[in-house]
Image (tube, rainbow, N blue to C red):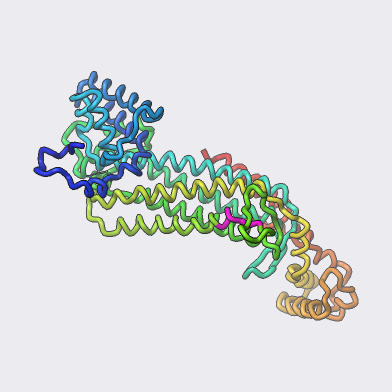
Amino acid sequence: MAKLWDARFSKAENGRVNDFNSSISFDCRMFREDIAGSIAHATMLGRCGIIEASEADKIVKTLREILADLESGALAIDPEAEDIHMFVEEILTKRIGDTGKRLHTARSRNDQVALDIRLYLRSQIDDIRALLRELLTTLVDIAEANADAVMPGYTHLQRAQPVTFGHYLLAYAQMFLRDAERLGQIRARTNISPLGSGALASTTYPIDRALVAELLDMDGITENSMDGVSDRDFLAELIFALSLVMMHLSRFSEEIILWCSSEFSFIELDDAFSTGSSIMPQKKNPDIAELVRGKTGRVYGDLTAILTALKGIPLAYNKDMQEDKEAVFDAIDHTKLCVELFTAMIASMTVKTERLREAASGGFINATDCADYLVKKGLPFRDAYRVSGRLVAFCIANKTDFESLPLDTYREFSPLFDEGIYDAVDLDNCVNRRTVYGGPSHESVLRQIALVRDGAARIE
Ligand code: ARG
């Protein structure tokens, strides 16, 4: 294909150089945004009298036809084109001749691509937030059904204190709520128009930048033309936000993997979300959770790639910046897949509440409550802590637990013990006495559920 810059060059481009330079294979996914940006630009050029109104109309009309043809498949993307911007302009010019050649007045591909990527990321952020809303709704439903399902909470992966499965899931809900909120903030910084920055030094035409932003439903315009074409902060922070989403999903996946092992056996994944082994007939593997955990690494890789690509680039545009797209597209594609599949996986899992309670019963996770009981009887906490510790050692040596120990035995350790100790170490009581704001008690869990539901509903 003939190049736009043939006039300046005396030789055709080397075939390998064209392939190396081309970004059409991946930036073709921005065709809607490229056309929307061009429609807004042409409309503005017409209204400002920079091109004839009739020509602007013709360009807009033809761009709409090109969009429809691309959507329907009537027009195929040319893999030989250098990028999506050149491709659309070439088709436009093919269809309406000289008028098409006027579209690029007062514009450079540098501000054009900066606009396109912002528009594309804006719509992707909306998609991802909708997926997070689904995940949050699913989490809250499971939490509500298991608001009283006592289970051990862990520190150092050692049984620590009793919580409920509902409270446990609501901890993850808080992480995903923050993720959704963070993405909303990044959307606001992304939804700013750089168009009018030109190649780097803006333009001499009397353009109306604010009008273009308004036509594209953007919240403002960039302040400095060199920053306008060079800034990819919004893109890097999006990959960072996606890395956090993946990190949260990965921690959760790790729990799922542990929980469905025979050793924990806290949940069972649905057959439709598990895989078998090619050799071991008994196996049921949590592949989805493992892949989510694994893909977290590649999204971190995308973040490292963009930060590294940007760190040495002098102002303003340099071709290195074309590398931003594959990194952010990869992070978006994989995060979307992971959130969607993870949601479906947990929505269909079975929670084994009896096993949760059994695990909560065996490990003296009410030892803190035993000490707190003595504190309420007047003993200083450090002394109460020692008495409770000696009781744990005694129970382990005698293969018993706090619930079954006779009162006489308790009293050998401290005369402060009375019948009330059995109430104090009862697991449900241990949970429900933790009425502190943010704690695992029944009321606190219900309040958290209402708050998360409310937060999820506010994700537009
Ligand atoms: N394909 C290019 C990119 O993704 C578009 C901008 C090209 N600008 C230029 N001056 N070569 O960055």
Looking at the picture, tell me which residue is in the foreground, 60 or 389. Answer: 60
Left/right placement of residue 339 relative to residue 231 reads right
Q: Give the quarter the ligand 1 occupies.
A: top left
Looking at the picture, tell me which residue is in the foreground, 255 or 7. Answer: 7
Q: Position of residue 145 (x, y in %)?
A: 72, 47
Left/right placement of residue 453 relative to residue 115 reads right
- Residue 239 appears in view: yes
Which segment is the magenta one? 284-290
Quadrant in the picture for residue 366: bottom right
Q: Quadrant of the N terminus?
A: top left
Please state the total of marks drawn on the protein image: 0
Looking at the picture, tell me which residue is in the foreground, 386 or 242. Answer: 242
Q: Position of residue 346 (x, y in %)?
A: 63, 49
Residue drawn at (64%, 53%) of the image: 169
34 inside magenta stretch: no
Quadrant in the picture for residue 212: top left
